[in-house]
Amino acid sequence: MASRRVVLCALLAAMMTVLQVAMSPLPNIEPVSLLVLVYALVFGRDVFYIIFTFILLEGLVFGFHLWWVSYLYVWPLWGLAVLLLGRGREKGPLLWAAASGAFGLSFGALCALPYLAGGPWAAFSYWAAGIPFDLVHCGGNFFLTLALERPLCRVLSLARDKMK
């Protein structure tokens, strides 16, 4: 059973990487936020194995630069937020879409933190220059999540249940 879990986590991380690269021509419209949300809802804490494998793959594909450092905390933070928000009763798609949109809007500010090494103005200018992209990220996350969260959760829940 442990080997199935490892293979599944690796496969889901690879799928996230491939989909992100495939959608890279669209500025800041990406499936990663949605997939982290769905993976967290369906697989619980195993989402962190998927996230850190994805982060490693991103570094291998695009290089290990300063932006990569922010991925070490931004994506796990989103996974944790979903796990905490997902506790309790069933949430509607509108709540998940709003949360995903808020995450997209805050993405630039979160990614600006490593740039504090250059001083507060370096971090601020990095964040401010990316606000238009954060707005697109917000909208993309909102609509992708609104449209796809429920069907993806259903399909992955079936796959998870068949593995047991």
Image (cartoon, helix red, strand yellow):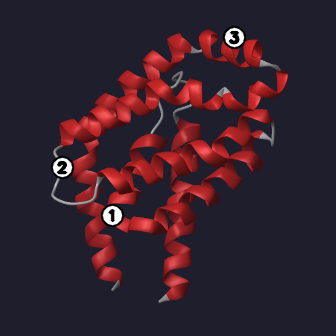
- How far apart are the two marked residues, 2 and 1, measured between alpha carbons? 13 Å
**First reached walking from the N terminus: tag 2 or tag 1:** 1
Quadrant hosting residue 96: top left
Q: Nearer the viewer, residue 90 or 10?
A: 90
Residue at image position (37%, 57%) is 83
Discs 2, 3 touching: Cβ within 8 Å = no
Residue 126 position (above or below residue 37): above
The residue positioned farthest toward the bottom in the image shown: 1
Q: Which residue is tagged 2?
A: 91
Residue 123 position (above or below residue 66): above
Discs 3, 1 touching: Cβ within 8 Å = no
Nearer to us: label 3 or label 1? 3
The amino acid on which the numbered mark 3 sits, given as a three-letter code, is Ser
**Crowd class of label 1 (few under 14; some 14 to 19; many from 20; radius 10 Å):** many
Q: Position of residue 17 (x, y in %)?
A: 58, 48
- In the picture, the disc for residue 42 is 1
Residue 91 position (above or below residue 68): below
Residue at image position (72%, 34%) is 67
- How far apart are the two marked residues, 2 and 3, measured between alpha carbons? 36 Å
Q: Position of residue 98 (x, y in %)?
A: 28, 32
**First reached walking from the N terminus: tag 2 or tag 3:** 2
**Crowd class of label 3 (few under 14; some 14 to 19; many from 20; radius 10 Å):** few
The amino acid on which the numbered mark 1 sits, given as a three-letter code, is Val
The residue positioned farthest toward the front in the image shown: 120
